[in-house]
Amino acid sequence: MRKLAMMLGATMLAGCIPSLDDATPTAPPPPPPRAEERPAPPAMQGDLSPPASDAVSTLPAPRPSWETRPVTPDAREIPASTYVVQLGDSLRRVADRTGSGSEAIARANGLQPPFVIRVGQRLSIPAGRYHLVRSGETGIAIARAYGVEWSRIVDANALEEPYVLRAGQRVIIPGPASGEHTPSLADRAAAFSLDVDDILTGGEPALASNQAPARPAATPKRVLPPTAVVAAPARLRSGFVWPVDGRVVRRFGPGASGERNDGIKIAVPLATPVKAAADGVVAYVGDGIAALGGLVIVKHGDNWTSVYGHASKLLVQRGQSVKRGQTIALSGDTGFADRPEVHFELRRGRTPVDPQSQLPRK
């Protein structure tokens, strides 16, 4: 079947926090697979056609946002200090005066919305290495520029849903973990690799002060630019359905050899239509995670996300609105798949959830 898939595939798929402020370098190649792993075949987007009733555009996906806006690692090291509030100061102005982040100052001083400060008030300015976010920069690109895991930056800044940065915001860049060897910045950036959590929490570009999230597109013919922010639906409008009808060959949770599986693997024939598990908006289309091959990620609202991997053909675009049961890809054996299969995940926020606990019983 692998030979058939490669014959039919014609063209390689092109890779595709809230803030108090008002206001990427080229991705390195993935590290070579271990000797016991075979190379991941590329996700294909060619002449393999879906059923006529599901026919859609096969426009190539644009480069992902984190590859289109370079980030310069020019963070400033700010020492701990005390600032006395002056007439006319706002939290944003204090942050600008001290080089710290307004969110970090609010957390250090126990300030709550609407973050009112008073003349003469003494504010603790927390020490840290602060990066000033520019318009269009993504969390992934910032993390890669500093060679730091994006999840550590999320934790250091207590970032929350929907994880959209804003231009003018300052985020803390944590140093190496305690006891960790400190390689050069270039080496750390080269070793940076993506996972699903990175894409969900660090994949959207920073909003400019006068910019709003883009409206979802109805069809794949309208391709949103990488600088557009995709807004997730506010609410999950329906329950989940199975993305394909097949046999579950690997279940959620730790495997026999101790590896973690954040979803399930469903064995199906090659080029089986893969359906959206619920209404939502496509957050990612591409093959940026080597192990998962051709990949689609859909946001559904109420912090729910679904993930579909190992596709041989991707039939939707980032920012496209999809309906439950709509064909979004064709199954394949791309990535580190042992057979034609679908890798399927459900996540609530950043936490993977056993899909079978949310799907209808067969």
Image (cartoon, rainbow, N blue to C red):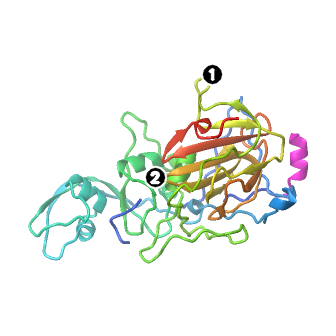
SS category of the residue bearing label 2: helix
Instruction: Tell me the residue at 75%/48% (across/down).
Output: 311
**Residue numbers of the magenta segment:** 1-10
Residue under numbered circle 2? 146
SS category of the residue bearing label 1: loop
Q: Are marks 2 and 1 in contact (CB under 8 Å)?
A: no
**Counting other residues with Cα less than 10 Å from the Cα at mark 2, is it few (<14), some (14-19), or many (20 or more)?**
many
Does residue 202 show up?
yes
Residue found at the far left of this picture: 120
In the image, taking residue 48 as reference, residue 348 lies left or right, namely left
Does residue 101 show up?
no
- Is residue 9 rendered magenta in the image? yes
Place of residue 29 in the rendered image (x, y in percent of width and height, measured from the top left): 65, 49
Quadrant occupied by the C terminus: top right
- Is residue 242 rendered magenta in the image? no
The quarter of the picture where residue 37 lies is top right
Of callouts 2 and 1, which one flags the residue occurring earlier in the amino acid sequence?
2
Kind of residue indicated by mark 2: Tyr
Give 20 or 216, whichever is nearer the viewer. Answer: 216
- Residue 43 shows which numbered tag? none
